[in-house]
Image (spheres, rainbow, N blue to C red):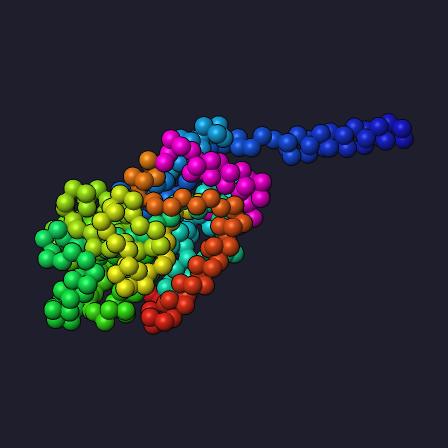
């Protein structure tokens, strides 16, 4: 009997040791996977590639980027939501795609507020209203007059899908100005820009990072910027609000994890991303990528922002009678 008791105690001690050792296993102990919904050459892809080296240095594991473009970010979102919630698979996305898709895609298979944990917001700013450099306009007033001089839907604008920032931004302009210009959807904003350069579309609202070098080189012309903060690299370009067109939504990138990811992991990633955002040596890099503002938010503050944006974009879609796909 004593031998049985001793054997049971030994087994219990072994199991307790194994459980303790497992609980104390170092994190992270495997490489991270970063799903980036923007295609190669997109603004989201450009911002995403700033992060891996710094994060890998901090956590001692590589951050491997895997692109998943298409369906206004939904393909990447679906891939991320099917991953384990262990903190090793992360979604790096243009945040606008996450918060507008619920209002623009019928029977959407994910719920950004319930299925994801917001880790961190990366940057803030607007999109640029751009036209080919040969277009005889220099600001919003002249652009609207130019569009009105054409027949209905004679002109088109490039966007990266129904519900994208470029789509909603131009639809807001159309509603307020009473102009007609038809949307031409592209898989990526980079593809839309290429068609704008050769005149296949007459306008676009790309992210600043993607349009900035083309504007600075004179290949396209910027007429206005959306958002609440002017573009530092283009001081001559006024905001839409300053030109009597309401546009208060700021664009940003963001990192998410599956809901249920341990809070300690989410907060650890949040702290390191915020450190990277505030690093003095990164200031010029963020400017180059087109961000005019680099807010610092906790993961909880960012999650609250996501919930507000989902609600606000639903109201915009309803007001504009924009129907889900």
Segment colored magenta: 256-283
Q: Is residue 175 above or below residue 224?
A: below
**What secondary structure characterizes most of the magenta part?**
helix
Residue 262 is drawn in which quadrant?
top right
The answer, for residue 276, to whether it is visible in the render is yes
Residue under the image location 68 percent in, 34 percent down: 19
Q: Position of residue 68 (x, y in %)?
A: 35, 46
Location of residue 76 in the rendering, given as x and y in whole percent from the top left corner: 38, 49
Residue 127 appears left or right of 262? left
Rendering coords of residue 120 (x, y %): 47, 45
Query: Does the magenta-highlighted stretch encompass residue 298?
Result: no
Q: Is residue 152 above or below residue 61?
A: below
Q: Is residue 71 left or right of residue 13?
A: left
Residue 206 in the image: above or below residue 8:
below
Residue 98 in which image quadrant: bottom left
- State left or right for residue 15 relative to residue 321: right
Give whichever of 16, 56 is nearer the camera.
Answer: 56
């Amino acid at each position: 009997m004593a031998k049985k008791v001793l054997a049971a105690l030994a087994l219990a001690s072994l199991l307790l040791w194994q459980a303790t050792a497992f609980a104390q296993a170092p994190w992270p102990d495997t490489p991270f996977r970063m799903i980036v919904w923007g295609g190669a050459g997109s603004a989201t892809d450009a911002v995403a590639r700033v992060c891996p080296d710094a994060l890998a240095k901090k956590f001692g594991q590589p951050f491997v980027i895997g692109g998943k473009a298409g369906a206004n970010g939904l393909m990447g979102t679906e891939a991320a939501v099917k991953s384990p919630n262990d903190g090793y698979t992360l979604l790096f996305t243009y945040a606008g795609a996450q918060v507008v898709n619920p209002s623009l895609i019928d029977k959407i298979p994910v719920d950004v507020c319930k299925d994801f944990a917001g880790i961190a917001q990366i940057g803030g700013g607007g999109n640029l209203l751009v036209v080919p450099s040969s277009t005889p306009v220099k600001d919003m007033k002249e652009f609207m007059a130019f569009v009105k001089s054409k027949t209905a839907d004679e002109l088109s604008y490039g966007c990266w899908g129904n519900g994208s920032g470029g789509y909603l931004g131009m639809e807001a302009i159309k509603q307020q100005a009473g102009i007609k210009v038809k949307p031409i959807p592209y898989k990526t904003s980079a593809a839309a820009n290429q068609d704008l350069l050769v005149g296949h579309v007459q306008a676009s609202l790309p992210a600043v990072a993607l349009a900035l070098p083309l504007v600075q080189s004179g290949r396209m012309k910027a007429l206005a910027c959306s958002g609440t903060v002017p573009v530092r690299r283009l001081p001559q370009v006024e905001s839409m609000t300053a030109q009597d067109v309401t546009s208060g939504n700021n664009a940003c990138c963001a990192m998410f994890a599956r809901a249920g990811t341990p809070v300690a992991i989410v907060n650890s990633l949040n702290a390191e991303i915020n450190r990277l955002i505030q690093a003095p040596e990164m200031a010029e890099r963020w400017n180059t990528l087109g961000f005019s503002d680099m807010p610092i938010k906790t993961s909880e503050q960012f999650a609250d922002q996501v919930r507000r944006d989902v609600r606000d974009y639903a109201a915009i879609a309803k007001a504009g009678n924009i129907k889900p796909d």
